[in-house]
Amino acid sequence: MKKSILCICCCVFILNFSQAQDNHMGAKHIKVKANWTVSESGTLADGHKIADLSWAANSSVACFPATRNQKFSGNHVFYTTTIPKRSEMFIKVIPKNKNQNFSLYAYEVGMTNNQLPPDLNSCVTCEADFKWDYKRRGKTQDHTREVRLNAINNPYKVVIGVVGAEGLTEGDFTLEIKLNGGEEISYSTPKIEVVKIETKGAVTVTNGNLNTGDVIGDLSWASNSSVACFPSIRNQKFSGNHVLYETTIPKYSEMFVTVIPKNKNQNFSLYAYMVGATNEQLPPNLTSCITCEADFKWDRKWKGKTQDHTRKIRLNAINRPYKVIIGVTGAEGLTEGDFEVKIEIKKR
């Protein structure tokens, strides 16, 4: 009986000791700089294996599936850094020996979250890269691994795991962290007078010039999930002057808004959103809306579709009317140019 108790105690001690090893691997902090790449040398020998990889397949983490656990079965070496708001981060591991098989993952958590695998319960996002099991069409892979993260309205702590695949426990490497953006920007308050348009009949046309508007430097409102007008990677398409119009979409109707630049060589963009009749919020102070649609010059061709110099969007209302704010914008910093706005309303 005493031997059984002693055996159980030993097993518990070994289990707790193993978990303690996993929980106290530590993580070296790396300081990054805006629009800069920093490098750090390391070795897998400084890390430890993580026997329980179930955290990675947890739906609140979703880093890599359990079928890929063998890609992360070697030593894990941890690093931490911070991704500032309005920035994207590219993390790359470069093994010194090109024949060694490495893997990589990185996840974002709140600034005060100190959880490390295998005790990670959830994260904002997690990305992983590892050696492919088969070739991918149009893509190639070498011995390096790379992941990308981004932050919009808030900074986050980033935890990076450099890992040996297939049980690899030794091997030197270089870790590179490239940060795009991340600088603190002080924006001036835009001076934009909203022009009210009273729609008359099925089609209403008005003329304008971008020089009557102003630049909206802070475009983070547009990528906010409660607005969802256009992603931050498209901010350059809306970096010129914004001219704002206000109108109303009647209930049981759909509205087509078209902007037609007078100069076909000028690059314009367009957006429009619907809000309640009493909502006075305007960009960059728009916190939410019913819906927002945007159109801009494509970066590549779409199969079966063509695009000219005009921009067009569609809105619709069902049981009630809504206020509509239309933004005619210069792309790529454009601040001057004549245009025509056409508003067409059709009954549903």
Image (cartoon, grey):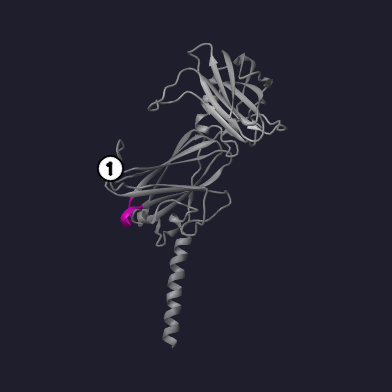
Asked whether residue 36 appears in the rendered view, the answer is: yes
For label 1, the SS is loop
**Would residue 184 be visible to someone looking at this image?**
no
Q: Residue 197 location in percent, x, y? A: 67, 20
Location of residue 18 with respect to 219 vertically, above or below = below
Image quarter for residue 248? top right
Toward the viewer: 99 or 29?
A: 99
Quadrant where the C terminus is found in the figure: top right
Residue 17: x percent and y percent?
45, 69
Residue 204, position as x, y percentages in the image? 62, 17
Question: For the magenta stretch, what is the residue range?
Answer: 164-171
Circle 1: residue type: Lys
Answer with left or right where residue 43 lies relative to residue 9. Answer: left
What residue is at 58 percent from the left and 32 percent from the top? 292
Quickly name the residue at label 1.
135
Question: Which residue occupies the extreme right position in the image?
Answer: 278
Q: Quadrant of the N terminus?
A: bottom left
Disc 1: CA contacts within 10 A as few (<14), some (14-19) or many (>=20):
few
Residue 238 occupies quadrant: top right
Asked if residue 122 is positioned above or below residue 209 in the image, the reply reads below
Residue located 60% across and 16% down the image: 210
Between 186 and 303, which is closer to the camera in this rendering? 303
